[in-house]
Amino acid sequence: MGDIFNQTDITLTFVFIFTLIAIGLYRRHLRSKDQPPGPWGLPFVGYLPFLGKNPPRKCTCLAKTYGDIFRIRLGSWPTIVLNSSAAIREALVEQSETFSDRPDFFSCKVVNNMRSLGFGSYTPRWRLHSKIASTVLREFASPNKPTTEKVIMMEAEKLTEYFLENTHTHFDPHEEIFFAIGSVIYQICCGMDKDCRNDKGYINLIKNTKMMQEFAGAGNPIDVMPWLRYVIPSKATRFVEILQTLIVSTDTIMNEHLQTFDEKYLRDVADGLIFAEKKYCRNPKKNQGITKSDIFSTLQDFLGAGFDTSSSTLEWIILSLGHYQHIQELVQQEIDSVIGTRSVSLDDMGKLPFTEATILETQRVSPVVPIGIPHATSKDTVLRNYRIKRGTVVLCNFYGTTRDSKVWRNPEVFTPERFLDDQNFINSSIENKLLTFGAGRRRCPGDFIAKMELFLFVVNIFQKCKIKLISEANFEGVFGLTYSPRSYTIKVFHR
Ligand code: HEM
């Protein structure tokens, strides 16, 4: 009798446990029906260990299984990854008020305590900050300002001269390109008479940028597992130290400008920011809580974001044209027939469609911002019938959008012609499919500067130089916040 009772007991216990598991699984199934699908991760670390060295590529592979919106967990952070231009636009443009926040990551907090332009939370204060920053940048770097063209041309010519002085040897152009492009944004921000090559703080900064880029890139372990900074404190400390050099360098520039500031004669972006501070910070009705330090920190954002992106793009263009000789020849034929031997100018933009298509195709094949700066949702929302909770991290896989075979035929093949229409003009609807500069409220405010730089540098260089790639062509770049080519060597010939 006792045995039977025990057996019934055991059976009931099993049935009870089984029912509980079944209810749990059913509830999870119901819940997951309105959640994006996605792969399982591990406790504590989530999917992070499986993202590998090239997260955008891994995400592109995952999208083939789970679709263009999928869910992963990065450490303790629920995350969704958007993998097509359509999904990115639906979130960042159609629901811009919800998808423009930044996650509360360690790196975002360290950069001006979530009050910076690039890493700051999406608040009314940030919106004012963004408006001020864009207005000042447009005012001092507009294509209509003769100094903008002059500064870019001066640096493009210096770089071309360097190339032509080294025709007797093979060399890696990385450093010269980096300084030439760095100098453009430096002069736009800090004054035409300045040379960034003489500013030790700035040099220090750009030399350390790579490390900073790696730190701030999507999926940085310390960002998504904050407890790690107590386990490996040196990494976090290094990031803070580098940031400090940037702050000291920009503070020095702002202080120098304050001493010589004359509101009737505004010289550059730094002066523009001082003027904006006077206009907004002293007016409680207008300022939305923005402070002098918020406005002045904009210089850090411009100097930080404005050179590695454009210089990596130029490096990819030289690598690509050094390898695809037939495309380089077509670019040169176009330059010869439209520009001849005179100097190129910004008025020529739009007159060299094949060259411009080549720049666009390089940006497609080698996107320098492959997964953007992480976004976050500022409230609960629904995206394509999926329920997305407030505070979810949102990664935009821009790299994935450039490999989407539904949008690009043979996406792996370098084909500038895909951007041209029947009349041989740039096809703007195809150009718009490229999200090189992001989308929505957080779209890059410096896109127009990058476009001018790339056009003038590329035309100036290939008008005067024939370039051959000497090292083996390697289109596998190094992934960080930006995606840059591995070191390569070229040989330059006079044209
Ligand atoms: C080829 C060159 C460039 C590329 C590909 C590029 C691309 C991008 C992308 C994809 C973003 C992120 C958007 C997002 O969070 O969704 C961004 C943000 C940003 N870019 Fe650029 N950029 C370039 C050049 C520049 C330049 C020259 C400046 C100079 C001022 C600049 C300033 C910024 C700033 C301040 C942000 C942060 C905006 C925000 O958080 O609201 N960028 N850029």
Image (cartoon, rainbow, N blue to C red):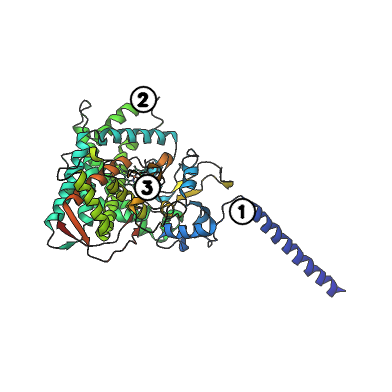
- The residue nearer to you, when weighing 294 against 411, is 411
Q: Amino acid at mark 3?
A: Thr
Question: At 34% across and 28% down in the image, what residue appears?
Answer: 280
Q: Earlier in the sequence, mark 3 or mark 1?
A: 1
Q: Is residue 488 left or right of residue 133?
A: left
Dot label at residue 436: 3
Q: Amino acid at mark 1?
A: Ser
Examine the rendered structure and indicate whether residue 233 appears above or below residue 447: below
The answer to whether residue 195 is seen in the rendering is: no
For label 3, being within 8 Å of ligand 1 is answered yes
Please tell me in which quadrant of the rendered image residue 38 appears: bottom right
Q: Secondary structure at mark 3?
A: loop
Real-space Cα separation, disc 2 to disc 1, in angstroms: 49 Å
Dot label at residue 283: 2
Please tell me in which quadrant of the rendered image residue 29 appears: bottom right
Question: How many residues crowd around disc 2 within 10 Å: few (fewer than 14), some, or many (20 or more)?
Answer: few
Examine the rendered structure and indicate whether residue 60 appears above or below residue 122: below
Real-space Cα separation, disc 3 to disc 1, in angstroms: 32 Å
The C terminus is located in which quarter?
A: bottom left
Question: At 47% across and 50% down in the image, what residue appears?
Answer: 84
Q: Given contact means CB atoms under 8 Å apart, are the residues at marks 3 and 2 in contact?
A: no
- The residue nearer to you, when weighing 333 against 403, is 333
Where does label 1 land, which residue?
Answer: 32
Mark 3 or 1: in front is 3
Question: How many residues crowd around disc 1 within 10 Å: few (fewer than 14), some, or many (20 or more)?
Answer: some
Q: Secondary structure at mark 2?
A: loop
Mark 3 or 2: in front is 3
